[in-house]
Image: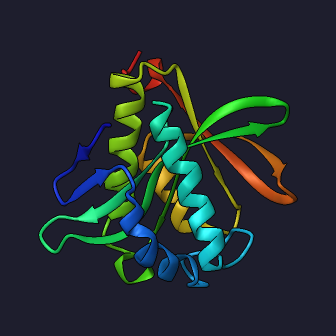
Amino acid sequence: MTTLQTQRLDLRPFAESDLDEMSALMANADFMRFSLGVFSREQTASFLEKVRARDRAALPSQFAVIVRGDEHLVGYCGFFLQNVDDMEELEIGYRLDPSYWGRGLATEAACAVRDHAFNDLELSRVISLIHPDNIASRRVAEKNGMRPEKQTTFRGFPAIVFAINREERNGR
C-alpha cells in the first residue's frame, strides 16, 4: 500500500490501531463541522473499515495524516468515491484536528494526494465537494489548483464542486 510524504507529513494507510485516535477526532464537533455531525466509536470503526476495505482492494482511499516528528495522527486526507449529480467522481477529502488548523497542513496533504492522483494513479480528474460556508476548505482547494465548477446539493447540503484535471495540473 502506498505511503506519501510531504515536508512535514506522512500519509499512510489506516491501521486497526488508529481507532482510538480517530474516534476522539470524529467525536469532535469542530473536526466534523460541515458534515453529518459527530461520529460514535462504532460509526468511526465502520468508516475505518470501509477505508481499509478499499485499501485491501487496491482502490483509491483515505490516508491517515501523521505529523512527522511526533508521529501524531491528526486526521485524514485522500479519496472518496462520490456520486455527484448522477456522475461518479473521485473526491479529494480532508479533515484535520482543529488544533492543527491554520498551519498549511491540509493544503500540504491535499497537494500530495492530488499529485498522487495524477502522477501515480493516472487519473484524469479529481474534485473536492465543499460547503459554501467552509472558507478554509475552499482556500485549500484553490491552493490545490482547483477551480469552482458548479454549485449542487450533495447529501442534502449545498456544495460547491471544485475540480482540476490532469491537463490543468500539468499547465496545458
Q: Quadrant of the N terminus?
A: top left
The x, y position of residue 143, in whole percent, is 41, 49
Front-most of residues 143 and 94: 94
The x, y position of residue 11, in whole percent, is 30, 52
108 horizontally vs 47: left or right: left
Name the residue rendered at 75%, 54% in the picture. Answer: 159
17 horizontally vs 70: left or right: right
Q: Quadrant of the C terminus?
A: top left
**Colour convention:** rainbow
Front-most of residues 25 and 87: 25
Front-most of residues 136 and 118: 118
Q: Is residue 8 above or below residue 92?
A: below
The x, y position of residue 30, in whole percent, is 57, 82
Q: Is residue 48 above or below residue 22?
A: above
130 horizontally vs 105: left or right: right
| Number of numbered discs visible in the structure rendering | 0
Name the residue rendered at 50%, 31% in the picture. Answer: 57
Q: Quadrant of residue 7?
A: bottom left
Name the residue rendered at 71%, 61% in the picture. Answer: 132
Name the residue rendered at 66%, 32% in the picture. Answer: 89
The x, y position of residue 20, in whole percent, is 43, 78
Taking the view exactly as shown, the residue that stands out farthest to the left is 69
